[in-house]
Image (tube, coloured by chain):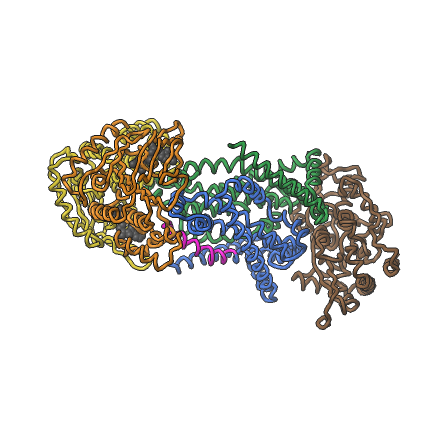
Chain colours: A yellow, B orange, C green, D blue, E brown
Amino acid sequence: MTKLEAKDIVKYFKHDSHKLKALGGVNLKVEDGEFVCLVGPSGCGKSTFLRIVAGLEIPDEGQILFDGKPVTTTGPERIMVFQEGALFPWLKVQDNVEFGLKMAGIPKEERAQISKRYLDMMQLTKFADSYTYQLSTGMKQRVAIARALVMDPDVLLMDEPFAALDAQTRDLLLVEMQLIWEKTKKTILFVTHNVAEAAVLGTHVAVFSNRPSKIKKLMPVNYKRPRLAEDESLLPFQQEILSELRPEVKKS
Amino acid sequence: MTKLEAKDIVKYFKHDSHKLKALGGVNLKVEDGEFVCLVGPSGCGKSTFLRIVAGLEIPDEGQILFDGKPVTTTGPERIMVFQEGALFPWLKVQDNVEFGLKMAGIPKEERAQISKRYLDMMQLTKFADSYTYQLSTGMKQRVAIARALVMDPDVLLMDEPFAALDAQTRDLLLVEMQLIWEKTKKTILFVTHNVAEAAVLGTHVAVFSNRPSKIKKLMPVNYKRPRLAEDESLLPFQQEILSELRPEVKKS
Amino acid sequence: MKKNIFLKKIAFYIIIVVVWQLFSISNIWPNNIFPSPYEVGEDLVFSAADGSLFFGIGTSILRLLVGLVIAIGGGVVLGIFMARVEIVNQTIGSLVLGLQSIPSVAWVPLAILWFGLTDAGIIFVTAIGAIFAVTINTYTGVKNINPHFVEAARNMGAKGTQLVTSVLIPAAFPYMISGFKQGWAFAWRGVIGAELLFSFLGLGFLLNVGRQLNDVSQVIAIMLIIMIIGVVIDGVIFKRLEDKVMSRWGLR
Amino acid sequence: MKKNIFLKKIAFYIIIVVVWQLFSISNIWPNNIFPSPYEVGEDLVFSAADGSLFFGIGTSILRLLVGLVIAIGGGVVLGIFMARVEIVNQTIGSLVLGLQSIPSVAWVPLAILWFGLTDAGIIFVTAIGAIFAVTINTYTGVKNINPHFVEAARNMGAKGTQLVTSVLIPAAFPYMISGFKQGWAFAWRGVIGAELLFSFLGLGFLLNVGRQLNDVSQVIAIMLIIMIIGVVIDGVIFKRLEDKVMSRWGLR
Amino acid sequence: GSGETTHENKIRVAYFPNIGHAIPIIGMEKGIFENHIGADTKIETKLFDSGPQVIESLFAGSVDIAYVGPGPAINGFLKSENHNVKILSGAASGGASFIVHPNSKINSAADFTGKRIAAPQIGNSQDVSLRNYLSENGLKPVEKGGSVIVLNIPNPDIYTLFTKSEIDAAWVPEPWASILVLELGGKRLFFEEELWPEKKFASVLLIGREEYVQENLQVIKGWLESNQQTIDWINENPEETRIIFNQFMKKTMGQSLSDSVIDESLSNLEITSDPIPNSISTFAQRADSLGYLGRHGYNLDGIYLDINSNSQTEEVFTTHD
Ligand SMILES: Nc1ncnc2c1ncn2[C@@H]1O[C@H](COP(=O)(O)OP(=O)(O)OP(=O)(O)O)[C@@H](O)[C@H]1O
Ligand SMILES: Nc1ncnc2c1ncn2[C@@H]1O[C@H](COP(=O)(O)OP(=O)(O)OP(=O)(O)O)[C@@H](O)[C@H]1O
Ligand SMILES: [Mg+2]
Ligand SMILES: [Mg+2]
């Protein structure tokens, strides 16, 4: 069943001196339970595309279908992990993680149980009572991930969630992500600039072209799981992604 | 000649429920012209250490010596690239890059020449007139790097500058960084969570232990330059760093 | 540390009083224009002794409280509506700006017409003098909220009242505090101004008596009391609130 | 689009006038308490015809301008000092809060004593009514600056005046604008209030005349003029300034 | 023509746009002052609406002479540096009444208990008279633990509250007294002068700063002469006075009073240069017993400008005793 479909998405932005065509007709079909990694040159429009899917931005042309119905607004079935965190500075770490649950009216004890599980997973238990300005960048990002996972959405939209993490923590989370996905069979769109990450996580890798971007190639990933970041067997596939990407970066 | 020396740096932070010892006596000696990459688990205190070196934070114990003199304040001889950018939203990209030059009283035309070089290098020429909210995350980070390089400081303090960049752009910048360093023989402290990056760039890699952190190991990197990210010959050294790191992340 | 600040403040005020006394001894200005602190003090002791001062303070503060509660309640609601509902902003918004520019004293004739010479009339003048300051600050605060906060919250299912209470208000709080501060300052001025013109009990009435009898030292004595109450309320209530919020936001 | 907004506004105001007319026709209140819009309009036409209205407007605006310039200049300087120099904040800062709570009307007797019945006296009342609002908003603005901005700027060699003009002022500008807005509102109120009490030319004088003669329709007519000028100044000057700054900060 | 003269001298005169201040209003409108002293002295007029503000302006040196009530005159004298604000002449006497609201059942002081009674500003003539009247009748205002609610509010607000039936009575000067009677159906319970020893009391006085007077004796002399001329003219031409007064109101305030109100007001006033010194000392006693003159006692010696060493002045000031 098709979970998400992007049809000819076009998006312009106004800059003082010129008009910028960021997305130039993006087409993408994501089946239920697929894990699609989006890669592309910096500034090509990956974040913009994710925001459109989340319903936070309106495309100038084209539309997003979710379960066959056009997306017009944002909703808790499509949860986004923002590239820059967007944690609430007035809430403690635990309250940040529980935010969506609270909005859904889930009682306090139950919330605490759920958030505890994800705080443990993200190794943040010790900081449950801290405020976000007291965290390091990587810790903030882990809070943002926990906050999204807690929502248990149909579709998870992740914008470079592991970018600020150290290699070790990331490796742990790469394994964790695969387990979560296998267990829940969520549909995931995952933006990354790390081809190894894409190869480890995705059922598919979508390569964006340079601006005005389209999806240049959608590559299925056919390796058995669990995959590890250090798997040498993934290297040829990574090279394949890179060879698609290289000419795009040169252009920009 | 010793350019920078950290002597028993200790730093505490106050959290609501407890006091956190972030740095537990960091000792580090950096000779003039060395390129030291700092790696360590998320939240161990790498950013904090860099801020102390920059003179932006005062250690609770110990001191930093710069050219043998204690550091008490910040100064343009030690320029920091902030992990979160800290670009000025009220300035256009080009004016952001030229900020330090303007402060130093350099005339407009000269500033424009210098900034043009670095904007080109960072592939941002087209966005010279944009405001920072109009940039993607990776583009912002490139502006931050350009803004620091333009200052031509003795010591460059870089806090995960490449974290938000796509693989291709990063590979280009890895080469660029090595060229800049070889040409100018700057002293560089470079925080990264990417061990490949550390192996490519550093003359040394300093591994932080978990909180309260010290420098667990200072490893010289003895491969000839220019090094490339895909060099397979660097893999064993990367494994060596990882094996130092792994137990630290487990602890946290 | 805290004691130190306190001592400095005391010293500062003592210096002011001494300089003032010296000035009035020097007789640059005649005494009926520029009374000495001694005379002013005498007046204070006198009105404290016969109880009229405390009765005046009590009356004014009671009116202040009622007026302020109305102003803050109404102002916050109106401000949020203006910021979030474009049509409200376009219509009522422009009216608010106009009403804001009418001085409290101008409302007095109408207040007397509509409410007569009652506490309600004074409270009306007070509230109407303060409500628009709160409204405008709330509006500015809500408009200045980092859009990511709102997006993230909506994405996690917050809407309607929840969005307002869980995100808009806390996120706009640093601005709103300054709105409350100003609202309270306007309200306090409004009470005193209204009492002065209504000449119906309270500190403003005492001020008016001083004026009617051309008793400058009483005028200054009452102005001092008004100031002191202003400083105390600000220090006891608003300073704490502000400090708390500021540290929560990592701004200290 | 813009035309649409304009039409909505017009419609809104027409509705208000119609409702008002209906109320006054209904004769719930006697006419000398609640005049009809027709009577108010008649009064306006009359005073416009004999020129007294325009003379009044001109006089008030001139006084406003002088007072406002003094208030903004002084307030910005004082506010920055308070935010950046702790001792200034601890001493003068607490005084400012006190002075801020004294209503303009309370300054009138002293202003007459010190300056006589002159323009200088009215300007004094105006400026002193506005300066502290500007001061406090500037202070809040500077205190709320993202500390990274200041750190980065100092790191790049900005200090003293440069730091103030290149970073503190632009970074605090969103707050300062609201300070200016409030400063101007205070100043405008101050002018009118002072004129009303001095009863010395200007719009406030006309208001007082209306009051002395129990001419409610003149009182309301002049209040309308005060409002309209308020809205115009706000719309022409401050709204534009604010829009520009807001879009610069990506807040729109 | 004032155009050609250089005017080394000038005189700044303060008064209210009020019927009790008929002398400066009519005198200026008819050019009596201008004709007499205008050739080498520039006359600047300043309109006020509150006595204390006039005193503040005298203190600040931005006004030279002023027409005010006895309250501010006494305060001005007592509070001024070296007592340099002094009474130069009288200007009006009488002209205040006690008006009862049509809905209120006040027939005498015995009915005051629990009633709301208004008078203008604290310390002005009507306020002092009202409070004194209360104590003479064994009554006290609420703030002193008594039973009468005394409200000190400006005349326009008294009018407003009268229309709204929110006060029971008011002790007000002309023209407000007549307005309340003629427009709002108030009942004049008594004229204030009925309560004074000689059935008259000073209600408007001409005061001035002594140093100005000393330096400009000629000007002051001329002013006082014109003052007297104006008084005579007014008393001879009540009809024309009303017309000129209304023209003045129309011109400066944009509105005029009804003929009947002005006529009634004028008939309740006496325009005179007699300062009625007895009434002033009585007034001071009353104000002092209300605590209005400070806590250190008072002394009115020298309140009338009188410089023996200067024969010119003496002559000027003896004309109306
Ligand atoms: N609000 C905006 N106003 C103007 N231009 C914008 C805005 N947001 C994004 N852009 C532009 O759109 C393009 C795509 O931005 P986007 O953030 O989607 O890139 P990205 O692929 O996520 O890049 P990165 O990998 O660096 O995060 C960029 O060129 C950027 O300048
Ligand atoms: N202002 C602060 N207040 C309280 N605690 C802080 C503050 N800044 C940092 N910390 C704490 O200090 C520790 C080190 O933080 P730091 O930002 O230096 O880590 P880091 O090594 O840079 O991590 P990352 O790789 O995630 O950026 C963290 O545990 C963090 O919670
Ligand atoms: Mg992005
Ligand atoms: Mg960090």
- Along the line of sight, which residue is nearer the eye, D136 or E23? D136
Looking at the rendering, the stretch of residues picked out in magenta corresponds to D230-252
Residue E95 pos. (x, y %): 78, 53
Residue C210 seen in the figure: no
- Along the line of sight, which residue is nearer the eye, C249 or A12? C249
Residue D250 seen in the figure: yes
- Along the line of sight, which residue is nearer the eye, A173 or B140? B140
Whether the magenta-drawn stretch holds residue D231 is answered as: yes
- Does residue C143 appear left or right of residue E259 in this picture? left
Report ligand 2 position as a quadrant: top left
**Vertical position of residue E291 compared to residue B26: above or below:** below
Residue B236: image quadrant is: top left
Residue C4 pos. (x, y %): 54, 33
Residue B195: image quadrant is: top left
Considering every residue shown, the one lying at the far front of the view is B1
**Vertical position of residue A141 compared to residue E194: above or below:** above
Query: Magenta: predominant secondary structure element?
Result: helix
Residue D184 pos. (x, y %): 52, 53
Image quadrant occupied by the N terminus of chain A: top left
Report the number of numbered marks: 0
Whether the magenta-drawn stretch holds residue E162 is answered as: no
Image quadrant occupied by the C terminus of chain A: bottom left
- Does residue A245 appear left or right of residue C89 in this picture? left
Residue B159 pos. (x, y %): 30, 41
